[in-house]
Amino acid sequence: MTTPTVEELVLRAAQKHGIPGPVGQELLAESRPCLHLVPFQDLTPDQQRAARPAARTGGLPCLPDGVDWPDGRDPLILTVDCAALPREALDIELPQDGHLLFFITIEYEPESSAVLHVPAGVRTTQRSATYEFDGEPEQVKVYQPDVLYAVPGLTVSPD
């Protein structure tokens, strides 16, 4: 299912490139809307003028008081600002505000992962990457932070 905004963009692009209307409709029937999270330099000049940060890769998590790293101490790979996502481009329900934090080990086949929703207005504290395990100091891997921007797109069926 595509949203009216995505349908309009696809059909307009198809027409601009000389693709017959029925082919554009077939593409729409086999696709779903998505958001691509991209760095600022990958945005078009028009997109850059209206850009609002929507996510951040890496860094340290800001978690509510009393909430620690998820079990397994997987690194934080992505923080998404739910309020910054363009709702008109999605066909799934996501929280209206707050942040989604994604924790997973990406170097190996993941054995665990976690997604936490931190509602807007909840007091948070940035967590340290160091911790103690069996009396020994350990360190969670911390990826370099980078700001990302949401760009509406489509995922197309591999068929």
Image (cartoon, rainbow, N blue to C red):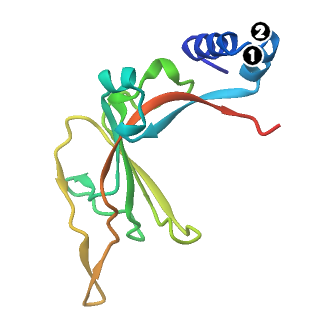
Q: Which mark is residue 21?
A: 2
Q: Residue at x 55, y 72 (%)?
A: 108
Distance Cα–Cα, label 1 vs label 2:
5 Å
> In the picture, which quadrant includes the C terminus?
top right
* Amino acid under disc 2: Gly
Which residue is under mark 1? 24
* Amino acid under disc 1: Gly
As drawn, the residue found furthest toward the bottom would be: 135
Pointer 1 and pointer 2: residues touching (CB < 8 Å)? yes
- Give above or below for 125 relative to 21: below
Q: Secondary structure at mark 1?
A: helix
Q: Residue at x 51, y 70 (%)?
A: 107
Q: Position of residue 130 (x, y in %)?
A: 23, 75
Rendering quarter of residue 30: top right
Nearest the viewer among 159 and 119 is: 159
Is residue 100 among the parts visible in the rendering?
yes
Rendering quarter of residue 16: top right
How many neighbours does mark 2 have within 10 angstroms: few (below 14), some (14-19), or many (20 or more)?
Answer: few
Nearest the viewer among 33 and 8 is: 8
Q: Secondary structure at mark 2?
A: helix
